[in-house]
Every structure is written in structure tokens, then in C-alpha cells.
Image: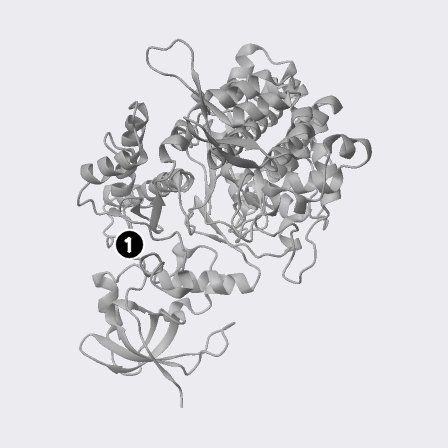
């Protein structure tokens, strides 16, 4: 006999609208979709009908095992959706808008069946594409034949990321309007891979010499592209090495947002490019969660550098460095435990990429010196001292790490030691700042802050080198100033930014990332739903209202005149502003707001019970109301710890650390510290909140690949 499982409440799907409920006509034997806690959306047969719920039996479905015959009791009417007999073979439906009955279950089933047939792309209207990460190579999707087909605008071609790229190019050339392709989704969804495919497709098809013949089977037929197309593609290994890392959900997760602008000349061929970056995850340089890694480039350097370079950098294995050994993960392994890449080969690829970006051998060595200095700085340890009449201070414990870091940074070891263990504080009425001793914990924090700044500035300089290379290509070298300005305003942009994030411990970085995603979600709602309903109304077409979650209240909470970011900026301007005062003002100004709660009051059971069960002992996910706040985002509730919120928003370092940077004679470090916004840095050298506000695409129209 089949086992019966009681249905649980609070399903996370859109409730039935009246017209859908009327179509059900529930009775014994009815075939419906049911939202169940254990099995998700399941096609089932109604066994009995109660006053407000039903008992069901699950039916057999393709590619689903061990579910047929299972019974579930007490499924609420609101958790049921109709089944359309006309949508029998949904795997052949390339656009979910073609479904006879459009609702959550029908869309999920369509995507599921297409996925098992290696049809990972599905349209959601003319300007949106759903892309599901297959976690494997599907060679036929990316052959020369596929490129030719989409380039030639073959009618009734299957949904594909190439098709969206071609549509953006057609709109650019036909209408003269800049296009933007937004790649959004959660971590591990494949956003970065989709962005790379878009760039590679445009590079392969918009060159004057990109007239590919026939239909071969090579996965990446880019051998005939011109100089600038190759440079755009060759910049990717450099960006990935310095900006990507392993997370618990993704082996190659982008830990920064980037907006790539591919510039076109009047004859519609690629003539240059630009990269803007946002919200680099600086905290990863000094700490990582369990199961994660630091940025790829550190491991590549440790594995790939040899001989004189390795000796000069004083490199050891990753296990020997505090900034690399916290998580216990040193390699990228597949599900069978085999290495996914050769770090030595990847190191050579990064060097080759830097050469392609016209970074000469001398500068490359200086890049490795700065990276190695960060690792050695991380190994500096401090011990707390009692200073008579002052209180706690600290000393640097004797080790080779300080001397090696000082040698690489070309800065005296005593200067580094002195300014890590003391902070310079300006006192009202005094001309000169005074030295205040730092205890070991404070010195630790100062050292970490210094390393984060060095890495951030180095990353920005590398992006600047890429932009200089792309803007100085042969294709643009003969342009007049007017032609150059015209090309800079004739582009296809590709935005690849973090997906929505919620971790065990969420801070200011996650707030900025989730705010950017809220804005993207709002843009999607405005373009896909509001605009569509307005068009129907204008044409006199009567349609049912489409139920959706409007995230405007959350966006307003974050960006209004008295919103989270404005209150945070104001608190930063107060001489004695504090994280606690910011939280108090936030909760006072938005008392009763539907999308804001005090820490520890989340309705999410995983958040609410975080410290209440033994399984979550010591978890950070539940804070007291004095240390955190909860925001209800479109993707769920997130609890944010306010610790260091003001410092992170200011995004500055104290005078002591600035002294170390100023006294360093390292030529590349001096160059990095002098870089301006137009070399790849976000404008105004602003804090994270300001960067999050600048993640707009700068273009109109275009397609969104999720």
C-alpha cells in the first residue's frame, strides 16, 4: 500500500487567480498539479475532496523515480493548479509563453523536461531567455554550424544564448540604439559562462573576416577573428584569475560584477571595448567560509611560479599561508574527486593574458610581488602588551613573514611594524595626529584592511590595463575624436553581476549585492509585466491580471530619502556615528515597514531556529535585535549583521596604513594608488553602497539571459 504524507503549509508559489481556480472543478479522479513539501510540484490524481483541501496520489512522470503511487493528505486548494491536456509534450515548447495554461507548475515541468533532453535554453517572451546550467559540455550547442545558423537569422531556430546575442546586434544595427544583455541568477546558475558565450559569439560573427564556411564541429571557432576580438576574449582569463573564486555552490564564482561594453564602428564591426567593475569582494582576500577558496590567482601563483621568481617571492605551498588555509580547501575537484584544472597551466594562461593586454614582463613580475606580499603580510602575527599608563598595545611576533613582506613592498620593516601596531588619530585642536597603541586584535584588523586595499587597487589597475588595451586597438587607432565618441556610444553591453546572496553570516557586502539584484528584478518586472499589461490595455485586449511579487517597497526601503543607504551615509558623517546608532535610527524611521524586521524576528524557520537547535549551535544567523536587522527581499528574508557597517560604507583606511603605502617604493603599488576612476575604478572612489547604485547598464532595449 502507498504511504501517505501530510502536506505542509506555506508553499512558496504564486497563489491561484480566480480564473485558474474555476478551471479545476475538483472531484474524485481530477488530474491536477499539487505543490508538496517533499516532492515539489507533482502531477497527481485527486482521491477525495474536503471542504478546503484534497487527498492526492502522485502519477508517473518522465525522468522521475520512486514517486508514482505516493499519497499526500490535506493539500490545500490554494496549492493546486490545473493541468492542460494540450500541453502534453512540453519539452518541444521553446517559449513558455506558448503554454496553453501558464503557471508555476507548467513552467517548471517544461524546463525540467527540456533539461533532461539537453535543451538548456528556453525563451520567456522575445526578450528573455531562461538558461539552466547543465554542469557538463553539450558540444552540439556551440559548433560552427550553430554560430552560422544564428548569424543567418534562420527562421524558427531553437532558443539559444547566441539567438539573444544576434537579436541585440540586429537591434543595434537596425535601430541605432545601444543594447544591454543582463545575466542574472543565483550563484552557480552559469551567469559568467553565458556572458562569455555572448562575447565570443559577437566576436566571431561581427568581424569583417568572420565569414565562416560550412558547418564543422569545433566548439570554439574563433580562429579568424581580428585583433580586438581576440583581446576582448583574452582579457577573460585575467579577470577570472583575479576576480573569481570557489564558493560552496560554484567552483568558478565571479566575486565582482562587471559590465562589458563591446564597441562598434559605423560599419557595425567590433572596434573596441570597455570593462567596468563593481563590488569586488575584498573580504575574501583575508577570510573565506568553510569549503571555499581565496581568489584563483593565489593558488595559480603558488603552483606555477618557479626558479628565480619563486625564490624571490619567497613562496611556499598554500597550506602555509593564513589567507589560504582557513577553509582547508586548496584544489578545485570534480564530483569524482579529480582535479578540474592544472594550476600551473592556468598560471601560464594568466601570464599570456597579461601579455595580450600589453602588460610587459617587468610589470608582470611586480604584480606577482604585490600578490606575494599580501600572503606574507597575512602571516604576520601580533601579541598583546600591557603599556603602563596607556593600556593594551601590541608587538609583531618575530618571523620571516614581516621581513619578506617588507622586501617585496620595498618598505622598511620597522615602518610596517610601527604603523600596524599603532593608529594615527587626529584630535580637535591639535595640529599633528597622535599615535594610539593597538592591541593584537586591532592590529590584525589593520593588517587585513591594508591587504584588502592593496588587492582592490591592483585589481582596478588590471581592469584599467584591459581598457587601455581595448581602447587603443588598431581598429580605433585611426579614428578622429568624433568617430571615437560615436563608437563609445554605439555598443552592446553585457552585465554579469552577483546573484542574490544569503549566507550564514550576512554583512554590508551582501546588502549591496542584494540591492543590485532588487533593482534588476524591478527592471524585469517593469519591462516584462507592467509594460506588457499596459500594451494589452492600449490595444483593448482583455486579459486576467498576472499575479506577481512587486518589490517596489523593498527598493524604496533601501534607496529612498530616508532609506537604509541614506541613513547609513548620514551616520557616517557624524563624528561619533556608530553601527548601533544607525540601526536604532533605521528601526525608528521604518517602524512597522512590511519589509523590515528587527534581528531575530525572521519568519524564515532556518533563520528563526538558527540558535535554538543543537544542529545550529554557534550559528551567526540569528542576532539580537541590537546587532542585526532583517529585510524581506524578493528572493527571501536575509538577516544582516551591522558590525563594521559604517567602516565598510566609508571604505577608507586610517592614516597609519596610508603611511605604509606612501613609504613603499614599489613602483606598481605607487601606480595603483594613483589610478583614477576612468581607468576601471567606479566613479568618485565611493564606498560599496555607492558602487551598488551604479550598476545600471547604460543602454536601452536588448535581451535578458537568466
Instruction: Return the x and y of residue 34 as percentages of the image width and height.
Output: 33, 71
- Residue 13, quarter of picture: bottom left
The residue depicted at 41 percent of the width and 83 percent of the height is: 69
The residue depicted at 58 percent of the width and 24 percent of the height is: 416
Q: Is residue 659 above or below residue 535?
A: above
Instruction: Return the x and y of residue 680 as percentages of the image width and height.
Output: 53, 24
- Scheme of colours in the image: one colour
Q: Residue furthest front?
A: 388
So how many labels did they put on this image? 1
The residue depicted at 59 percent of the width and 56 percent of the height is: 135
Q: Residue furthest bottom?
A: 1
Instruction: Return the x and y of residue 81 as percentages of the image width and height.
Output: 31, 67
Asked if one can make out residue 290 in the rendered structure from this viewpoint, the answer is yes
Callout 1: 10 Å neighbours few (<14), some, many (20+)?
Answer: many
Of 8 and 448, which appears nearest the observer?
448
Of 636 and 575, which appears nearest the observer?
575
Image side of residue 91 versus residue 512, left or right: right
Of 208 and 27, which appears nearest the observer?
27
Question: Regarding mark 1 in the picture, which secondary structure is present there?
Answer: loop
Q: Residue furthest top?
A: 431
Instruction: Return the x and y of residue 452 as percentages of the image width and height.
Output: 53, 32
Asked if one can make out residue 212 in the rendered structure from this viewpoint, the answer is no
Q: Is residue 503 above or below residue 10?
A: above
Q: Quadrant of the N terminus?
A: bottom left
Q: Which residue is mark 1?
A: 602
- Residue 481, quarter of picture: top right
Of 567 and 37, which appears nearest the observer?
567
Image side of residue 276 versus residue 209, left or right: left
Amino acid at each position: 500500500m502507498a504511504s501517505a504524507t501530510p502536506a505542509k503549509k506555506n508553499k512558496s508559489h504564486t497563489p491561484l487567480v480566480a480564473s485558474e481556480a474555476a478551471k479545476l472543478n475538483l472531484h474524485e479522479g481530477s488530474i491536477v498539479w499539487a505543490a508538496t513539501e517533499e516532492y515539489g510540484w507533482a502531477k497527481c490524481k485527486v482521491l477525495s475532496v474536503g471542504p478546503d483541501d484534497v487527498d492526492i496520489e502522485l502519477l508517473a512522470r518522465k525522468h522521475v523515480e520512486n514517486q508514482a503511487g505516493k499519497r499526500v493528505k490535506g493539500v490545500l486548494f490554494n496549492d493546486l493548479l490545473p493541468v492542460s491536456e494540450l500541453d502534453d509534450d512540453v519539452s518541444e515548447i521553446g517559449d513558455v509563453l506558448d503554454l496553453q495554461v501558464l503557471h508555476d507548475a507548467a513552467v517548471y515541468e517544461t524546463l525540467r523536461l527540456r533539461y533532461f533532453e539537453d535543451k538548456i535554453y528556453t525563451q520567456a517572451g522575445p526578450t528573455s531567455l531562461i538558461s539552466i546550467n547543465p554542469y557538463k559540455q553539450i558540444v552540439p550547442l556551440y559548433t560552427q554550424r550553430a554560430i552560422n545558423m544564428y548569424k543567418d537569422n534562420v527562421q524558427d531556430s531553437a532558443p539559444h544564448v547566441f539567438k539573444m546575442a544576434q537579436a541585440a546586434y540586429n537591434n543595434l544595427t537596425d535601430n541605432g540604439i545601444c543594447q544591454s544583455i543582463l545575466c542574472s541568477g543565483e550563484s552557480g546558475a552559469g551567469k559568467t559562462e553565458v556572458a562569455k558565450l555572448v562575447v565570443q559569439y559577437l566576436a566571431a560573427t561581427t568581424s569583417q573576416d568572420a565569414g565562416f564556411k560550412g558547418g564543422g564541429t569545433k566548439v570554439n571557432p574563433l580562429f579568424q577573428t581580428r585583433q580586438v576580438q581576440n583581446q576582448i576574449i583574452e582579457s577573460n582569463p585575467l579577470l577570472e584569475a583575479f576576480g573569481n573564486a570557489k564558493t560552496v555552490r560554484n567552483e568558478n564564482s565571479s566575486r565582482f560584477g562587471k559590465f562589458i561594453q563591446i564597441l562598434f564602428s559605423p560599419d557595425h564591426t567590433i572596434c573596441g571595448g570597455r570593462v567596468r567593475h563593481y563590488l569586488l569582494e575584498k573580504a575574501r582576500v583575508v577570510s573565506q567560509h568553510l569549503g571555499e577558496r581565496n581568489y584563483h590567482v593565489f593558488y595559480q601563483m603558488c603552483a606555477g611560479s618557479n626558479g628565480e621568481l619563486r625564490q624571490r617571492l619567497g613562496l611556499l605551498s598554500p597550506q602555509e599561508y593564513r589567507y589560504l588555509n582557513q577553509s582547508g580547501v586548496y584544489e578545485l575537484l570534480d564530483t569524482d574527486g579529480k582535479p578540474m584544472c592544472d594550476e600551473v597551466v592556468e598560471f601560464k594562461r594568466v601570464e599570456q593574458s597579461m601579455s595580450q593586454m600589453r602588460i610587459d614582463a617587468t610589470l608582470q613580475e611586480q604584480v606577482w610581488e604585490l600578490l606575494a606580499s599580501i600572503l606574507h603580510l597575512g602571516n604576520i602575527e601580533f601579541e598583546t602588551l600591557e603599556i603602563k599608563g596607556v593600556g593594551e598595545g601590541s608587538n609583531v611576533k618575530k618571523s620571516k613573514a614581516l621581513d619578506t613582506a617588507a622586501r617585496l613592498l620595498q618598505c622598511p620593516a620597522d615602518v610596517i611594524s610601527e604603523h600596524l601596531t599603532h593608529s594615527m588619530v587626529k584630535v580637535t585642536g591639535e595640529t599633528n595626529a597622535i599615535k594610539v597603541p593597538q592591541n593584537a586584535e586591532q592590529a590584525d584588523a589593520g593588517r587585513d584592511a591594508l591587504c584588502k586595499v592593496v588587492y582592490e587597487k591592483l585589481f582596478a589597475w588590471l581592469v584599467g590595463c584591459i581598457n587601455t588595451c581595448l581602447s587603443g586597438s588598431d581598429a580605433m587607432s585611426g579614428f578622429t575624436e568624433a568617430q571615437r565618441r560615436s563608437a563609445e556610444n554605439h555598443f552592446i553591453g553585457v552585465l554579469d553581476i552577483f546573484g542574490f546572496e544569503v549566507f550564514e553570516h550576512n554583512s554590508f557586502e551582501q546588502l549591496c549585492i542584494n540591492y543590485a539584484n532588487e533593482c534588476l528584478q524591478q527592471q524585469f518586472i517593469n519591462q516584462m509585466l507592467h509594460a506588457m499589461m499596459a500594451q494589452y490595455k492600449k490595444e483593448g485586449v482583455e486579459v486576467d491580471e498576472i499575479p506577481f511579487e512587486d518589490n517596489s517597497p523593498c527598493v524604496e526601503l533601501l534607496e529612498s530619502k530616508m532609506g537604509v543607504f541614506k541613513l547609513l551615509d548620514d551616520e557616517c558623517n557624524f563624528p561619533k556615528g556608530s553601527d548601533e546608532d544607525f540601526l536604532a535610527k533605521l528601526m525608528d524611521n521604518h517602524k512597522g515597514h512590511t519589509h523590515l524586521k528587527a534581528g531575530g524576528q525572521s519568519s524564515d524557520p532556518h533563520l528563526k531556529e538558527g540558535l535554538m537547535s543543537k544542529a545550529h549551535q554557534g550559528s551567526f544567523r540569528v542576532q539580537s535585535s541590537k546587532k542585526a536587522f532583517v529585510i524581506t527581499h524578493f528572493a527571501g528574508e536575509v538577516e544582516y549583521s551591522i558590525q563594521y557597517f559604517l567602516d565598510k560604507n566609508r571604505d577608507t583606511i586610517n592614516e597609519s596604513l596610508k603611511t605604509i603605502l606612501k613609504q613603499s617604493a614599489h613602483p606598481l603599488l605607487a601606480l595603483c594608488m594613483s589610478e583614477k576612476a576612468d581607468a576601471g575604478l567606479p566613479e568618485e572612489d565611493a564606498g560599496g553602497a555607492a558602487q551598488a547604485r551604479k550598476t545600471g547598464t547604460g543602454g536601452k532595449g536588448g535581451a535578458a539571459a537568466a
